[in-house]
Amino acid sequence: MLFTLLLGACATLPPAAGTTRAQVLQLWGPPTAEHALPGGVQRLEYASGPYGRTTWMFDLDASGRLQQARQVLNEAEFQAVMALPGLRAAEVRQRLGTPGEVRPLGWRGGEVWGWRYPTNDCLWFEISFSAEGRVQGGGYGADPRCDTPADRD
């Protein structure tokens, strides 16, 4: 049931500005996450992960009407996050959504988050966080899901 719902959401075009929250939920179903933003804005996250390559963010104003809808897994959004060194993990999640993969950094603490995104190459974007939960760095790399068993001979 949930898979069918998410599949339907992925095939649906984003709603138009001014659409009500109830209409968004009717069209797209329950969001994968919700984020409270300044000014009473509520951000609804629709992530297709962990192996999906899209995350839609719908920003609703304080009256519950859609202000904007955008797919955030793209190079422009990644660069905007990287332009803000020291950003907190919660702020990254508000901007990029739920990562497709989270790995620990080891004895020093911290984590590495990875997102797949629409690209003609088999890449993904990763951000490393300090033990305090702040962005340390990030970049593009080969998506490990692209390695097939035949590649490991």
Image: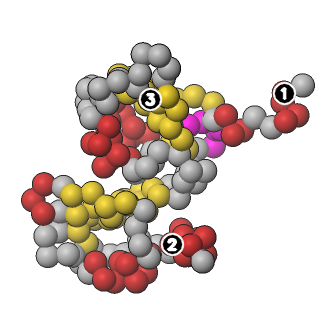
Amino acid found under the numbered disc labelled 1: Arg
Please, which residue is most extreme toward the left here? 39
Marks 1/3: CA distance? 27 Å
Marks 2/1: CA distance? 36 Å
Do the residues under discs 1 and 3 have CB atoms within 8 angstroms? Answer: no
Please tell me whether residue 123 belongs to the stretch shown in magenta.
Answer: yes
SS assignment for the magenta stretch, majority:
loop
Category of crowding for the residue at label 2, using alpha-carbon neighbours closer than 10 angstroms: few (below 14), some (14–19), many (at least 20): many
Q: Which residue is mark 3?
A: 111
Image position of 96 with respect to 135: above or below: below
Image quadrant of residue 120?
A: top right
On-image quarter of the N terminus = bottom right
- Is residue 123 something one can see in this rendering? yes
**Which is more foreground, mark 1 or mark 3?**
3
Marks 2/3: CA distance? 30 Å
Q: Which residue is mark 1?
A: 152
Residue at the spot x=42%, y=62% of the render?
A: 32
**Which is more foreground, mark 2 or mark 3?**
3
Residue extent of the magenta highlight:
120-124
Category of crowding for the residue at label 1, using alpha-carbon neighbours closer than 10 angstroms: few (below 14), some (14–19), many (at least 20): few
* Percent coordinates x, y for residue 45 in the rendering: 37, 60
Amino acid found under the numbered disc labelled 2: Ala
Q: Which residue is mark 2?
A: 9
Image quadrant of residue 26?
A: bottom left
Of the numbered discs 1 and 3, the one sitting upstream in the chain is 3
* Percent coordinates x, y for residue 6 in the rendering: 54, 70
* Percent coordinates x, y for residue 72 in the rendering: 40, 51
Of the numbered discs 2 and 3, the one sitting upstream in the chain is 2
Category of crowding for the residue at label 3, using alpha-carbon neighbours closer than 10 angstroms: few (below 14), some (14–19), many (at least 20): many
Which of the colour schemes (rainbow, by chain, secondary structure, one colour) is used? Answer: secondary structure
Asked if residue 29 lies left or right of residue 37, the reply is right
Image position of 117 with respect to 61: above or below: above
